Image: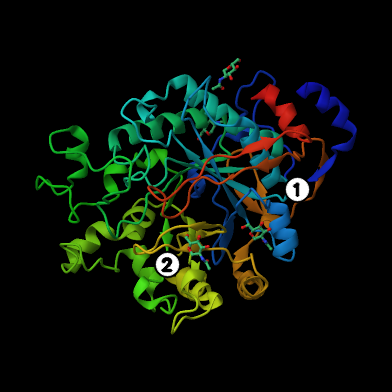
Amino acid sequence: MVALAAIALLASQIAAQLSPPVTINDAKGNPLPQCAFDASKGKARLEPPLDGYMMLGMSLDWSYETPTTSSQGKMKGYTAAVYNSWLDMGPSLGNGTGYDKNMLNWFGSEAGRVGAILELTLNPPKEFSPTGPDLKDLTPEMYDSIARDFARINQIYGTPIFLRWGHEMNGDWYGWGNEPRAFIASHIALTNAVRKYTNMTAMVWAPNIGITYPFVGGGARESPAPGGLDFDLLDTNKDGKIDSFDNPYSPFWPGDDYVDWVGISLYYYPRQDCHNDCPVPDNYFKQLLTGGFNNPEAPGSGDTNAWLATRNFYQQFAEAKNKPMMLPETGSPWIANWSTRAGATTEVKVKEGWWSQVFSQDTMKNYPRVKLAVQYEEAKPLALDGEAAFQDWRVTNNTETMNWWNGFIGGFKSNLRDASQLVYNCDGSITIGSKQAVTTSAGGVASVTGGASSSGPGVGPTSSKSAGSVNMVSGLAAVVLAYFL
Ligand SMILES: *[C@@H]1O[C@H](CO)[C@@H](O)[C@H](O)[C@H]1NC(C)=O
Ligand SMILES: *[C@@H]1O[C@H](CO)[C@@H](O)[C@H](O)[C@H]1NC(C)=O
Ligand SMILES: *[C@@H]1O[C@H](CO)[C@@H](O)[C@H](O)[C@H]1NC(C)=O
Ligand SMILES: *[C@@H]1O[C@H](CO)[C@@H](O)[C@H](O)[C@H]1NC(C)=O
């Protein structure tokens, strides 16, 4: 039935694609010599030459918008370098990878249509259950299958992929959280598989910011009890406890060879006591980045040196590991519920306060390894400080905020590389140039129903998201790939 639909649509589905197909294998499926990643060039996989530049990414709610509608419609023709999407595995791992391959294909084709890099946040089985599937249940065949799927997206659409696997693994709100040994083994297995098939997919290692680490009450796996190997790893100062004196990140590091980019989930939150009326404090972004922001309630936060030694993410992972860094999801939410209270400020101020620190001359000068910041362009009901709230991180969902955003990005644009300037090569390098649209029949036009997104801030007990499904009615590329994948 699906195949018949494809034939009927063949003639009508010729679409322009900005990322031309890339040849990464010979006729026998073996890697081509020119596609070998060359570390001696001094750049990571998918690290463009960005001296003096940064990149913008957009993490869309794909249930109602795509890179094309976001860039060409709302952002007045400005195409971000990166678009993020979310993909869930499981809960039943089924016959293979347990995720919706058509959805993956659609994300790849839509990013390729605008010539952007796809950030793909791939969630291992998410629900925590002692009997359900877990990181430990993933098999070599599954890693191999995932890697081949990603390589095909790289090849067919020419779309490079930032593969963010098992993000926020230091939290207690996902099924893969708080199990450093299983995470590391899994990350290494997936990295090895991916590199066998492609160098155009880069591995991103991205925990959650550890201000309130160790996290409690997130609804999935809490910190392990003493006596096990995971406990020993997480008790970094070996004092017999997992507490705020321990390093929130290092137990999950898979090793320098298995990470291309580092990242951290990092947001601004207006707190309850000031009801949308908190200006973003000066230097707030860089304090988060470097651990300078203390959690006043955490034991040990008064001891600045001890705190900084474990909390300075930028120094420990971008500088010391010599890696490019991204903010794979970031933003500042407007909480309309609080907008009528005395002293409330405006949505634009809440968002401008954050973004003017992230995209700034200060960031470029003092934190040059921060190369990419991805705006979390979603909204969801999510309590803040125990109060019901609808948090809206979006910058393009109403005219006033969108006008500010477009003006803001317009003003910073000379410091940004956008999708039209990035040329992707099969060895994982990116050069600066201009690219031309090619006409291709592989321009997927499937549409999404349901909530395509599956994560973002404040997940855990409050989140209720599920992977959407692709409506295949007019999805030629999805149909074609259903055979390949
Ligand atoms: C990726 O690059 C490595 C060298 O860094 C090379 O050995 C490998 O074959 C390449 N993979 C592909 C699929 O080209
Ligand atoms: C596994 O494959 C069978 C037949 O190929 C199919 O009917 C079934 O829905 C698949 N299960 C999952 C979870 O994908
Ligand atoms: C306030 O929060 C609730 C709970 O999330 C939400 O349903 C409601 O729409 C919000 N009201 C406004 C005005 O945003
Ligand atoms: C705003 O978001 C809603 C969903 O929350 C969506 O249906 C609508 O199209 C969006 N409007 C714009 C201008 O993006």
Label 1 vs 2, first from the N-terminus: 1
Residue 53 falls in image quadrant: bottom right
In three-dimensional space, the C-alpha distance between marks 1 and 2, rounded to whole angstroms, equals: 34 Å
Position of residue 424 measured from the top left corner of the image (x, y, whole percent): 65, 46
Where residue 407 appears, as percent x and y from the top left, is 65, 75
Name the amino acid, label 2. Answer: Tyr
Residue 311 located left or right of residue 134: left
Badge 1 marks a residue whose secondary structure is: loop
Q: Is residue 66 visible?
A: yes
> Horizontal and vertical percent for residue 62?
63, 48
Report the side of 301 relative to 28 (left or right): left
Label 2 sits on a secondary structure element that is loop
Left or right for 295, reference 478:
left
For the residues carrying marks 1 and 2, which lies nearer the camera in this image?
A: 2
Q: Which residue is mark 2?
A: 268
**Residue 345 numbered tag:** none
Task: Name the residue located 30 percent from the left edge and 64 percent from the top edge.
Answer: 291
- Ligand 1 falls in quadrant: top right
Judged from this view, the residue extending furthest toward the bottom is: 343
* Residue matched to label 1: 18
The total number of labels drawn is 2
> Does the Cβ of the disc 1 residue fall within 8 Å of ligand 4?
no
Residue at the right extreme of this rendering: 11
* Residue 170 vs residue 116, the one in the foreground: 170
User: How many residues crowd mark 2 within 10 Å: few (<14), some (14–19), many (20+)?
Assistant: many
- For the N terminus, the quadrant is top right
**From where the camera sits, is residue 26 visible?**
no
Within 10 angstroms of label 1, few (less than 14), some, or many (20 or more) residues?
Answer: many
The kind of residue on which mark 1 rests is Leu
**Eyeballing the image, is 167 above or below 364?**
above
User: Answer yes or no: do the residues labelled 1 and 2 have beta carbons within 8 Å?
Assistant: no
Residue ID at (29%, 41%): 178
